[in-house]
Image (cartoon, grey):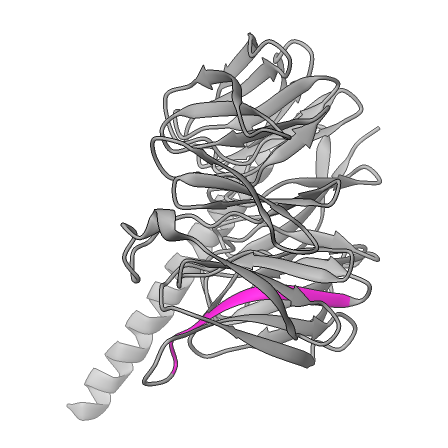
């Protein structure tokens, strides 16, 4: 009887495996069929090892892509072959979007492996993946803070209501600012902490529902602009104007010198990090739309509705804007008119930014893969 039950169990396991493989093959066939007329081909894809999806923005430097998955790993991947150069494995950790400068990867990390949770800034050798130094940030919060590096200094926010400037080579403390305006955000809250912006020796950084400007060298406070809810985007700047999105549904245009509001454009959801090209600012929203707004007047030029939320930055190359959506889709639009050129059906929501280099589109997907799609000429 036991032999019979064992045999039945083996047969059932084989049947279930065959069904799973059949479904996987059907999914691949479906993706191939629906994308057959889309002018891109799969160059390569790389599966992450320890979790189901990629959540962080991807960064490219010296033909290498750096990215984090939803915990456990930071990856370095060859952009041409899709081969993994190295991975930094942490059993219980979350990594921010990395910043890569002069052969060093700077990344924020939230470590919950011990009795005490730790938030830190780490510098990692870009070639080997080896740790160079670690600076412990104060406070405890499951928020992964993204750094920005400029002029030999790393700038980053922290859950202890501080904004830090750290020496990029040594990891030594330079200055910090105590954010007294966001005390309502208790440690442990989930709130956004976008990467700072460095421009003309000024650091612009969001924390809670405030955008701050500091002298990059001394940390001297310049101004604060308060929105009605959490600031959800990394600032963008052009022509002495700073642009930032908020979860209060507004895109704000702020005078870079004074911190005064110039104009605000009201969308309908949470606004994520914008990009600026040819006097047009493009940004995605949780209301399913991609917006194009004139940077001087705040006038809407066009908007395009996708099938779901847009939570990462688009990319504009040669008059085409590429953007990912939670609708399992990558879109290519005419940047002037907003008209759709094509839609590529992905195998999961696209929650990372898009990078386009040498006619290849790179993006991370919530199916657990990093993709490279070659644009057909």
**Residue drawn at the location 54% of the way across and 61% of the way down:** 176
Can residue 117 be seen from the camera position used here?
yes
Residue 306 in sight here: no
Magenta segment main secondary structure = strand
Q: Closest to the observer: 374 or 114?
A: 114
- Say which of 237 and 19 sits in front: 237
**Dividing the picture into quarters, in which one does residue 369 lie?**
bottom right
The N terminus, quarter of image? bottom left
Which residue is found at the position 69% from the left and 11% from the top? 336
- The residue positioned 52% from the left and 14% from the top of the image is 303
94 shown above or below 163 = below
Q: Position of residue 78 (x, y in %)?
A: 77, 61
Q: Residue 296: x and y, percent?
A: 64, 12
Q: Where's residue 363, x and y in %? A: 62, 46
Residue 370, quarter of the rendered image: bottom right
Residue 23 vs 133, above or below: the answer is: above
Observer-nearest of 195 and 253: 253
Q: Position of residue 150 (x, y in %)?
A: 74, 54
Measured along the vertical axis of the image, is residue 76 above or below residue 307? below
Q: Give the range drawn in magenta.
A: 104-113
Q: Quick one: 182 or 58, which is closer to the camera?
A: 182
Quadrant of image for the C terminus: top right
336 to the left or right of 349: right
């Amino acid at each position: 009887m036991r032999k019979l039950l064992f045999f039945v169990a083996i047969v059932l396991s084989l049947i279930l495996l065959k069904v799973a493989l059949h479904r996987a093959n059907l999914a691949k066939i479906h993706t191939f069929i629906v994308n057959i007329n889309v002018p891109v081909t799969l160059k390569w894809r790389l599966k992450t090892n320890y979790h189901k999806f990629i959540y962080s923005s991807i960064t490219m430097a010296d033909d290498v892509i750096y990215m984090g998955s939803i915990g456990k790993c930071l990856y370095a991947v060859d952009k041409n072959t899709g081969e993994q150069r190295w991975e930094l494995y942490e059993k219980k950790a979350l990594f921010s979007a990395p910043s890569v400068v002069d052969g060093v990867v700077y990344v924020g990390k939230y470590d919950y492996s011990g009795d005490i949770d730790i938030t830190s800034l780490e510098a990692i050798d870009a070639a080997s993946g080896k740790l160079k130094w670690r600076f412990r940030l104060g406070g405890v919060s499951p928020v992964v803070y993204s750094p920005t590096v400029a002029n030999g200094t790393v700038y980053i926010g922290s859950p202890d209501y501080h904004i830090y400037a750290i020496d990029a080579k040594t990891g030594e403390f330079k200055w910090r600012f105590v954010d007294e305006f966001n005390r309502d955000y208790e440690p442990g809250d989930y709130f956004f902490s976008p990467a700072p912006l460095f421009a003309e020796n000024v650091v612009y950084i969001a924390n809670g529902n405030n955008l701050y400007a500091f002298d990059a060298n001394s940390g001297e406070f310049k101004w604060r602009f308060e929105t009605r809810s959490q600031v959800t985007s990394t600032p963008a700047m052009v022509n002495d104007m700073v642009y930032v999105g908020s979860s209060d549904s507004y895109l704000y245009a702020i005078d870079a010198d004074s911190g005064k509001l110039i104009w605000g454009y009201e969308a309908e959801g949470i606004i994520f990090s914008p990009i600026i090209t040819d006097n047009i600012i493009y940004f995605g929203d949780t209301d399913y739309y991609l917006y194009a707004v004139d940077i001087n007047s705040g006038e809407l030029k066009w908007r395009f509705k996708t099938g779901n939320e847009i939570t990462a930055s688009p990319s504009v190359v040669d008059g085409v804007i590429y953007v990912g959506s939670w609708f399992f889709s990558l879109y290519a639009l005419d940047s002037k008119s907003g008209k759709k050129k094509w839609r590529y059906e992905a195998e999961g929501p696209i929650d990372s930014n898009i990078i386009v280099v040498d006619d290849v589109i790179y993006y991370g997907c919530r199916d657990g893969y990093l993709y490279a799609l070659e644009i057909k000429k």
